[in-house]
Amino acid sequence: ESTGQHPADDKGQDMLMDDLDPNDMSAAEIQDDPVAESVYRLRHTPPDRTHLPALNDKSFPTETTGRDFIMVLFYLTFDARSMAFLHSYSEAAMMLSQHAPVQEPLAAIDCYDWTDVCGKHNISRYPTVRIYQRNQDVTEYRGMLATQAVVATVTLYQASAPEILTSTEQVSAFLAGQVPEDIASVTNVSVLGLFPQHDSQGLSAFKKTAGELHGKVLFGLATGDVANTVS
C-alpha cells in the first residue's frame, strides 16, 4: 500500500543507515555519545513491542480522538535517536501493561511508513512524543527519553487531578505515597490541599492548578470535616 512520499529516497536512506552503522562506531564515539552507545548496545536486539501498538493512517485518528488518554511516539526507523528511544519506550509499555487498564496507554507510529499522517500533524523532528486526552488540547511530552520517565508521566496522568480524599485514612495514605496505588514508585512529591469550606476561592484556584499540572505533579484534596480534622 502506498503511504505517500518517503522523507528520503532509497539512496539517501542507505547513506543514513551507513552513517549509523553500529559496527563502524569507534570506542571514543560510543563513550562520548549516549545515543550512539545505546544504538551500539542494542544493535542486535529488536525492541519487544508486544504492548506497543503500531498506528497507521486508519488507527491514528481513531486512537487519538476516542481515548481518554494515549501517548504517541513519532519516530523514523533510520534515525539513531528514534531507535534508541524506541527500546526505552517499548520497555515502558511493558512495565505499564502490568497495571494498565484494558487499553494500552502507549502507541507509536513510524513516520517513514506513514509520512502523510506525520506531515498532517507537523512532525518535523524525531523522536517526538505527544499526549492526547479526550476533549483537551494535544500536549507535547518534554521529559527525559528514558523508560522510568515515561512510566512516571503516564502514571501521574492516570491519577485524578486532584485525587479526592474522603477520609482521614485516605489522607494519611496519600501522604505516605500509597494513594493512588503504586504512585510512590514514580514520585515522592505531592501537594495536599485542605479546604474546610467547599465554596472557597482558594478551592477553585487549587483545582485549576491541579488540572494545569496534571501529569507533572500529584495533587490531593480533602474538604469539609476531613480537612478540619486533618488540619
Image: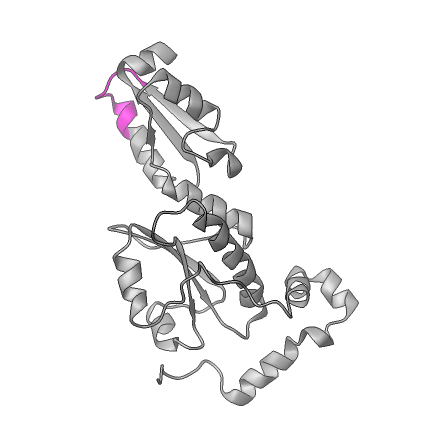
Q: Is residue 231 visible?
A: no
Question: In front here: 53 or 138?
Answer: 53
Q: Is residue 34 visible?
A: yes
Q: What's the residue at 35%, 19% (across, down)? A: 194
Asked if 32 appears above or below 16 in the picture, the reply is above
Question: In front here: 231 or 171?
Answer: 171
Asked if 182 appears above or below 69 in the picture, the reply is above
Q: In the image, residue 63 lies at what x, y percent?
A: 30, 60
Q: In the image, residue 229 lies at what x, y percent?
A: 35, 10
Q: How many marks?
A: 0
Q: In the image, residue 64 lies at what x, y percent?
A: 30, 59
Q: Quadrant of the C terminus?
A: top left
Question: In front here: 126 or 62?
Answer: 62
Which quarter of the picture shows residue 210? top left
Q: Is residue 165 magenta?
A: no
Q: What's the residue at 46%, 80% (across, down)? A: 7
Q: In the image, residue 41 lies at what x, y percent?
A: 68, 64
Residue 189 horizontal side relative to residue 20, left or right: left
* Magenta stretch in the rendered image: 195-204
Which residue reaches farthest bottom?
Answer: 11
Q: How is the image coloured?
A: one colour
Q: Quadrant of the N terminus?
A: bottom left
Q: What's the residue at 52%, 73% (across, down)? A: 77
Asked if 102 appears above or below 27 in the picture, the reply is above
Which residue reaches farthest top?
Answer: 229
Which residue reaches farthest left?
Answer: 199
Q: What's the residue at 38%, 71% (across, down)? A: 118
